[in-house]
C-alpha cells in the first residue's frame, strides 16, 4: 500500500531538481557510521549523516528494531528516520554477536547510540572501551540529559517539554501542551549530527576521535531561551502563546468564508496599508486610533473583531494571490496529510519517492537544505531486517559458515504491536 495520492506520487517522481549525488560525490562519501539506536533521536542523526553520503550501518537485533512494529503515533517513525541505511542483524546478548559488532566498530569513523544510561557500558560499548580499540572513532550519544544531577533520569520528548518550559508556552494557562511533533528528538538528532561534523573536521588535524553528546532537555531549554531572555530583559514573565501580548496587532488566525481558517499577519505599516486596501477597509486607515503598530496593539481586541467580520466574507483562494502580490504573511491551516499534495513541495523537489521495506512506495520529505541547488535524495530502499548482514560480515573476513551461525540473512518480521 502506498501513502501518496496518484497526483503527489507523480509530482514527486517527476521533479526536475537534480540530486546532490547526480552533481558529484556527496560530502560524507567514504565515512562509515555504525548506528545502534532506535525510536527517533539516534535514527535522525544517522539519517542526516546518511543523506550527506556516509555509509550508515544500522545494527538491529534479530527481530529488528522494535520501532519497525510501532502503531499509532509511532507508525511513521521507522520509515521517516531510517533511509539511506544498511541493516545488519546481530544478537548482542551472545558472545559471537558482540564480537562481530566490535569488529565492525574497528572499521568505523562514527558510532551512534541512544540507549538508556549504563546500557552501552554493560555491553562494553561505551566510549572509553571503544576508544581503546579505535582511537579515531567519533562516538555520539543521544541522551535525556547532559552530565549533571538529572543525567541518570530517563527522558522522553514529552518529559523535557514539560520540564523546559515549552509545554507551558504552547498551551493556555493551566493546560500545558506538548508540541505536535517530536521536536526535541528530531532536533537532538540534528545537534548530534552537527557535533559529528565538527569532530570529523577536527580529526583532520588531531588524528583522534571525540565523544559527542546531545540531550533532549538541553535541546528544549534552547527552544525556551528566547522566553528566558524576554524575562531577563523586561522583568515580566513570558505568557503562554495563547495568552501572549503580541508585538503586532494583526498576527492571528481568522475564519474566512466556508469555515476556512487562515493565519494573517501585518507586521509593518506597509503591510497594514496593503491589507486594508485588499479588504476595502479605508475607514481603518483613516482611524487615528490605528495610526501606528503600537496604537493598533492597544486597540487589538476590537480591531481583530472588526477585521474578522470583514474576512469572514472572503474566500481563501481569492486572498492568496493578493497577499502574495503585496507581501503579506499568511498561511492556510494545513493538516499533515495535505502536504503530500502541496504544490511547492512537489514542484521544488521537496518530496522524493522512497521505497519501503515491504516494497511499497511513499513520498517522503527531504532534509530542508540544498547544496549547489541540489536536494539530498534517498539512494536505496528502507532496508529489510538484516538485509546487509552477510555482505557486511564478509567485508570483515567472516566465511559463509560463520555468517550462517550468526544468522546472517534477511529476517521477515510481521508488523505487530511491540
Image (cartoon, rainbow, N blue to C red):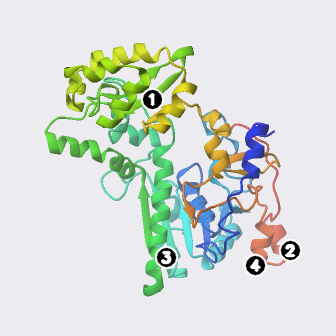
User: If you read the primary sequence from the N terminus, does the residue marked by circle 1 or circle 4 appear first?
Assistant: 1
Query: Dot 4, crowdedness within 10 Å: few (<14), some or many (≥20)?
Result: few
Work out whether mark 3 precedes mark 1 in sequence or the reverse, and give the earlier one: 3
First in sequence, mark 2 or 1: give its number.
Answer: 1
Disc sitting over residue 263 in the figure = 1
Which residue is the site of mark 2? 401
Alpha-carbon span between mark 1 and mark 4: 55 Å
Answer with left or right where residue 247 lies relative to residue 31.
Answer: left
Q: Count how many numbered circles sit on residues in the image.
A: 4
Pointers 2 and 1 in contact (C-beta within 8 Å): no
Q: Is residue 73 something one can see in this rendering?
A: yes
Question: Which label sits in the foreground, 4 or 2?
Answer: 4
- Picture quarter with the C terminus: top right
Q: Nearer the viewer, residue 209 or 372?
A: 372
Q: Earlier in the sequence, mark 4 or mark 3?
A: 3
What residue is shown at x 60% (from left), y 70% (from top)?
33
Label 1 crowd bin: few (<14), some (14–19), many (20+), radius 10 Å:
some
Real-space CA distance between mark 4 and mark 2, rounded to the nearest whole angstrom: 14 Å
The residue that disc 3 covers is 200
Judged by depth in the image, the label closer to the viewer, 1 or 4, is 1
Residue 355 shows up from this direction: no
Identify whether 216 is placed above or below 88.
above
Residue sitting at 60 percent across and 59 percent down? 47
Quarter of the picture holding the N terminus:
top right
Amino acid at each position: 500500500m502506498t501513502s501518496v495520492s496518484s497526483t503527489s506520487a507523480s509530482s514527486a517522481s517527476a521533479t526536475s531538481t537534480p540530486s546532490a549525488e547526480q552533481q558529484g560525490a556527496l560530502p560524507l562519501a567514504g565515512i562509515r557510521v555504525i548506528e545502534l539506536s532506535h525510536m527517533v533521536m539516534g535514527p535522525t542523526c544517522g539519517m542526516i549523516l546518511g543523506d550527506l553520503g556516509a555509509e550508515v550501518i544500522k545494527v538491529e537485533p534479530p527481530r529488528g528494531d522494535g520501532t519497525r512494529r510501532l502503531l499509532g503515533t509511532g507508525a511513521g517513525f521507522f520509515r521517516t528516520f531510517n533511509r539511506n541505511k544498511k541493516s545488519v542483524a546481530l544478537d548482542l546478548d551472545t558472545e559471537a554477536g558482540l564480537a562481530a559488532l566490535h569488529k565492525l566498530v574497528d572499521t568505523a569513523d562514527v558510532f551512534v547510540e541512544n540507549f538508556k544510561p549504563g546500557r552501552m557500558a554493560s555491553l562494553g560499548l561505551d566510549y572509553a572501551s571503544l576508544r581503546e580499540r579505535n582511537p579515531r572513532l567519533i562516538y555520539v550519544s543521544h541522551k535525556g540529559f547532559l552530565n549533571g544531577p538529572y543525567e541518570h533520569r530517563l527522558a522522553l520528548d514529552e518529559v523535557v517539554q514539560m520540564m523546559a518550559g515549552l509545554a507551558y508556552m504552547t498551551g493556555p494557562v493551566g493546560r500545558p501542551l506538548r508540541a505536535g511533533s517530536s521536536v526535541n528528538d528530531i532536533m537532538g538528532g540534528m545537534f548530534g549530527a552537527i557535533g559529528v561534523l565538527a569532530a570529523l573536521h577536527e580529526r583532520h588535524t588531531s588524528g583522534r576521535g571525540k565523544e559527542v553528546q546531545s540531550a533532549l532537555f538541553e535541546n528544549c531549554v534552547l527552544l525556551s531561551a528566547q522566553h528566558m531572555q524576554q524575562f531577563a530583559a523586561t522583568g515580566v514573565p513570558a505568557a503562554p502563546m495563547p495568552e501572549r501580548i503580541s508585538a503586532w496587532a494583526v498576527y492571528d488566525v481568522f475564519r474566512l468564508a466556508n469555515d476556512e481558517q487562515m493565519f494573517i499577519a501585518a507586521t509593518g505599516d506597509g503591510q497594514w496599508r496593503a491589507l486594508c486596501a485588499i479588504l476595502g477597509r479605508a475607514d481603518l486607515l483613516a482611524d487615528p486610533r490605528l495610526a501606528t503598530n503600537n496604537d493598533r496593539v492597544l486597540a487589538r481586541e476590537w480591531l481583530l473583531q472588526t477585521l474578522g467580520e470583514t474576512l469572514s466574507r472572503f474566500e481563501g483562494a481569492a486572498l492568496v494571490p493578493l497577499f502574495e502580490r503585496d507581501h503579506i504573511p499568511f498561511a492556510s491551516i494545513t493538516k499533515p496529510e495535505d502536504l503530500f499534495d502541496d504544490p511547492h513541495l512537489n514542484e521544488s523537489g521537496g518530496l522524493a519517492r522512497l521505497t519501503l521495506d515491504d516494497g511499497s512506495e511513499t513520498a517522503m520529505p527531504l532534509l530542508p537544505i540544498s547544496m549547489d541547488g541540489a536536494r539530498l535524495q534517498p539512494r536505496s530502499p528502507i532496508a529489510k531486517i538484516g538485509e546487509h548482514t552477510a555482505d557486511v560480515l564478509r567485508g570483515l573476513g567472516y566465511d559463509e559458515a560463520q555468517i550462517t551461525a550468526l544468522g546472517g540473512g534477511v529476517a521477515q518480521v510481521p508488523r505487530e504491536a511491540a
